Image (cartoon, grey):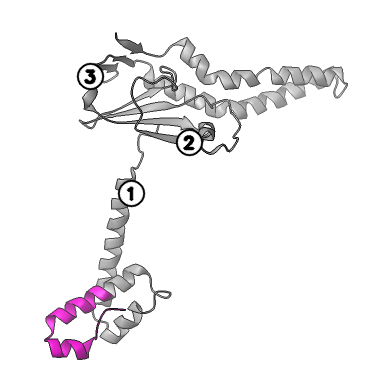
Amino acid sequence: MTDKFQINGRHQFKSIREGLILVPLGPVGLLVGLFWGKFGVEDLPLMLTVFGLYYLILFSPAFYLHITYLIDNWDTQLSVDKEEIKIQGKKGEFRYRQEDIEKTELNLGIYYKNRIDNRGRWTTPWTNYGYLKLKLKDGKEFYFTSLMIDLDKLPFPVTSTRFRFTPYIDRDQVQYKDFKAHSNRIKQDKIAEYEERFNDVADDRLLEKINNPTRFEFEARKAAENILERRKKLLPPTQAISHGGTLDN
């Protein structure tokens, strides 16, 4: 049996449902205020303006997510069976086997983290919005939003989950391994820069830097160690001992 997914009215309603629950509260509040004499009929235009601005601000994240999800998935059709995955969209048609999946990442609103830490977060008009990021072994990535799939009944097993205040589609997400590699490159560049600056510094001054971690950052101390180590290797053993001493501190 093949399961097919695409944008439809049911999924759109389910995504905005939490917001629609809040809509009647404004009119009810106005009627209660009129009934209890908190304001008169002449105040209605002002009150309607206030409520309109309030709803506009409150619903703006939901409007943004709904529109961007529509744009992203408007022409997307997903077909899944036990063996094959077919994805049809703006860039053409793609066919994969189930074993071609490398990773599936579920992006949910922060409210759903309550299931893990029981923090009692409140729902918002955009609570039910989210998407599934599908990454294939050939490097291609696809995004299936809550406007076309049920986030609590997914067509693929989930390998990881992200909880975010506003789950906008994040195409430039930096993976931890990429961040770590970038940090390591920055660290190595700083060490190289310090080595160039310390190249003509005397050994005793370099040892002073190494032995003062509160005054000198790690990269500076590491550069001093590297320079002393190179000098030690270039000198005969007797000269190395008298010239710089040991680096074990």
Q: Which residues are magenta?
A: 225-249
Q: Which residue is mark 3?
A: 94
The stretch drawn in magenta includes residue 237? yes
Of the numbered discs in the image, which one, if any, rests on residue 210? Answer: none
Q: What residue is rendered at 31% in x and 84% in y?
A: 205
Q: What residue is rendered at 33% in x and 11% in y?
A: 3
Q: CA distance from mark 2 to mark 3?
A: 29 Å
Is 189 drawn above or below residue 13 in the view shown?
below
What number of labels is visible?
Answer: 3
Left or right of 170 in this view: 127: right
User: Could you tell me what secondary structure mostly forms the magenta stretch?
Assistant: helix
Question: Do the numbered discs 3 and 1 sit on residues whose CB atoms are within 8 Å?
Answer: no
Q: Which residue is mark 1?
A: 179
Mark with earlier residue (2, 3): 3
Residue density around tag 3, few if under 14, some if 14–19, many if 20 or more, within 10 Å: few
Measuring from the top left, give residue 129's x and y in whole percent: 48, 25
Can I make out residue 197 in this image? no
Q: What residue is rendered at 60% in x and 18% in y?
A: 20
Can I make out residue 172 in this image? yes
Instruction: Specify the amino acid type for callout 1.
Output: Phe
Q: Which residue is mark 2?
A: 164
The stretch drawn in magenta includes residue 157? no
Q: Quadrant of the C terminus?
A: bottom left
Mark with earlier residue (2, 1): 2
Viewer-nearest residue: 9 or 55:
9
Mark with earlier residue (3, 1): 3
Measuring from the top left, give residue 149's x and y in whole percent: 41, 18
Kind of element beneath mark 3: strand
Viewer-nearest residue: 2 or 194:
2
